[in-house]
């Protein structure tokens, strides 16, 4: 049994029936390489059962501390029922991408059962062309982008023949359900440590509170961060002035209160075209991804008569997981908050501006403690974490306060080599992420082989058509590639 960190617990506290704390991955498979040319639920079950010993979060169940006086614990579920977590369904003909996206949006909007380990897997048959989809939902309290990728890497194989594992001894798994008295005693001991954790983390957190998305828009936070930053320098800190993110996020139609339902759209962009732009302009792949997002959002908002004159603000999650923390799961993340040049009409200049702001953001990030999110959360007693999350969410949607950010844009590295599930070849892996009050839109990119697989998630009432945003992303890449292709040899895109 082990305790959730304050960052892990925050994803649980944020759930209120409208905000969901889980993330999903939508894999598209070609079953032609699988035994019998089919990917069946039985075959998927065999893979999961064979590897369950290496899939720790799939066996973890929550043990809340009485009265929420401390963060909850994970324990090995003694009544683990694999079949409960595996489901199968089929799309009606013709089984096209839009039907699939609609089904995924509905499945993603359903909360996970907290009385069970917090994950589900759906095998979706009936896709056009004989393809099969697998939607995997896991709570963000258990995994972040990198550790979620580690989970998928356990399920997937580098060739159709699969891997061989020793049979799992079921008696190795499962702990007694923690008793309420024992949990209460643990909680009381934790209460005594809470002020010490807050005091220990204060020198690290206070100078950087303007980078914490959930509180940065609150009155006085910027001034507090700047003031404590000056004190730190006087006392022998970094000795220099770090550029701060002082921009306010303009309000758009998707920066309001979200509902419980979602929209989802997806696409794959050719990585060779992205690298051609990267090489021609001397930037990074991530710079190109952010510039594509800025251009697509500019087109999309302009088409809806909702384009602000000021740049949008994006939160870019960054992994701070060290090599030694591989396989530990949970969340090891920080964030960068950067202005997107949605106010810039020239596509090439958008790339240049993104490169400039990302260079500054990276300098600030390198000076930011890896434990910032956790240190900031230590100021909030666990018993108040859920209420504080709801209050901050309500403030984010009320004028005259600006939303903390406009959009989340995440770029997660994936496998450059082919992957297989029960012999079926993975063709694409689309992320399906989470949104929150004030930030009703998320774009997450996952690299796989020679493509960038993009998943767009929005609130159903705030984002009327997520597919148009996908079309704008494709158009933006086409425009950028056409600008650089005449001066970029094809060999440079490798």
Image (cartoon, rainbow, N blue to C red):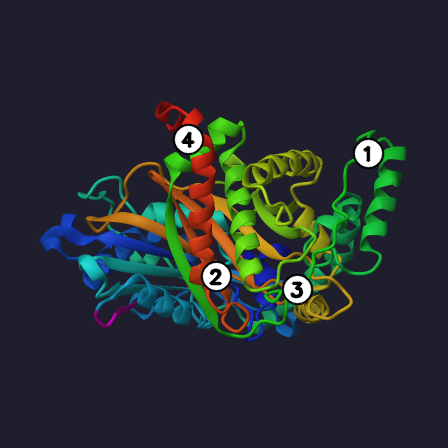
Give the Cα distance between marks 4 and 3: 57 Å
Tag 2 or tag 4, which sits nearer the N-term? 2
Q: Which residues are magenta?
A: 87-93
Kindly state the secondary structure of the residue where label 4 is placed. helix
State how far apart marks 1 and 3 are (Cα). 37 Å
To which residue does mark 1 refer? 241
Q: What residue sits 54% from the left and 76% below the top?
A: 17
Residue of label 2: 457
Q: Find residue 403 and report its image quarter.
A: bottom right
Q: Are marks 3 and 2 in contact (CB under 8 Å)?
A: no
Say which mark, if any, is on residue 70: 3
Q: Quadrant of residue 258?
A: bottom right
**Measured Cα–Cα span from mark 1 to mark 4:** 40 Å
Of the image marks 1 and 3, the number of the one nearer the N terminus: 3
Left-right relation of 259 to 39: right
Q: Position of residue 282 (x, y in %)?
A: 53, 27
Residue 485 has which mark?
4
């Amino acid at each position: 049994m082990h305790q959730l960190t304050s960052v892990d617990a925050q994803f649980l506290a944020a759930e209120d029936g409208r905000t969901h704390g889980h993330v999903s991955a939508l894999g598209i498979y070609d079953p032609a390489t699988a035994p019998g040319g089919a990917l069946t639920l039985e075959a998927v079950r065999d893979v999961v059962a064979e590897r369950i010993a290496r899939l720790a979060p799939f066996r973890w169940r929550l043990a809340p501390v009485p009265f929420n006086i401390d963060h909850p614990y994970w324990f090995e579920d003694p009544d683990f029922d694999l079949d409960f977590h595996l489901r199968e369904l089929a799309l009606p003909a013709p089984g096209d991408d839009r039907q699939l996206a609609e089904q995924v949006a509905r499945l993603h909007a359903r909360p996970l059962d907290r009385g069970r380990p917090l994950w589900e897997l759906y095998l979706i048959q009936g896709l056009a062309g004989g393809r099969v989809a697998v939607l995997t939902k896991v709570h963000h309290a258990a995994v972040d982008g990198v550790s979620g990728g580690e989970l998928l890497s356990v399920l997937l194989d580098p060739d159709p023949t699969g891997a061989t594992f020793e049979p799992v001894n079921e008696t190795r798994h499962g702990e007694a359900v923690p008793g309420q008295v024992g949990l209460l005693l643990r909680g009381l001991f934790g209460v005594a440590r809470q002020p010490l954790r807050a005091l220990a983390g204060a020198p690290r957190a206070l100078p950087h509170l303007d980078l914490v998305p959930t509180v940065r828009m609150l009155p006085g936070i910027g001034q507090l961060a700047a003031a404590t930053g000056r004190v730190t320098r006087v006392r022998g800190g970094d000795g220099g002035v770090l550029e701060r993110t002082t921009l306010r996020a303009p309000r758009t139609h998707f920066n309001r209160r979200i509902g419980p339902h979602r929209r989802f759209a997806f696409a794959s962009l050719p990585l060779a075209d992205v690298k051609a732009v990267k090489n021609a302009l001397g930037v990074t792949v991530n710079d190109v991804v952010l510039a594509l997002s800025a251009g697509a959002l500019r087109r999309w908002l302009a088409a809806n008569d909702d384009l602000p004159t000021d740049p949008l603000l994006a939160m870019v999650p960054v992994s701070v997981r060290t090599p030694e923390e591989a396989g530990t799961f949970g969340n090891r993340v920080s964030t960068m908050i950067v202005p997107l040049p949605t106010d810039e009409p020239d596509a090439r200049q958008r790339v240049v501006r993104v490169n400039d702001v990302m260079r500054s953001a990276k300098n600030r990030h390198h000076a930011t403690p890896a434990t910032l999110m956790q240190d900031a959360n230590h100021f909030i007693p666990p018993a108040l974490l859920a209420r504080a999350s709801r209050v901050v969410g309500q403030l984010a949607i009320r004028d005259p306060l600006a939303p903390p950010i406009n959009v989340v844009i995440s770029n997660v590295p994936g496998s450059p080599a082919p992957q297989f599930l029960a012999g079926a070849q993975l063709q694409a892996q689309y992320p399906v992420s989470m949104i929150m009050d004030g930030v009703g839109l998320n774009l997450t990119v996952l690299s796989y082989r020679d493509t960038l697989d993009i998943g767009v998630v929005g609130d159903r009432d705030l984002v009327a058509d997520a597919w148009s945003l996908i079309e704008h992303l494709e158009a933006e890449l086409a425009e950028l590639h056409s600008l650089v292709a005449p001066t970029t040899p094809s060999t440079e895109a490798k």
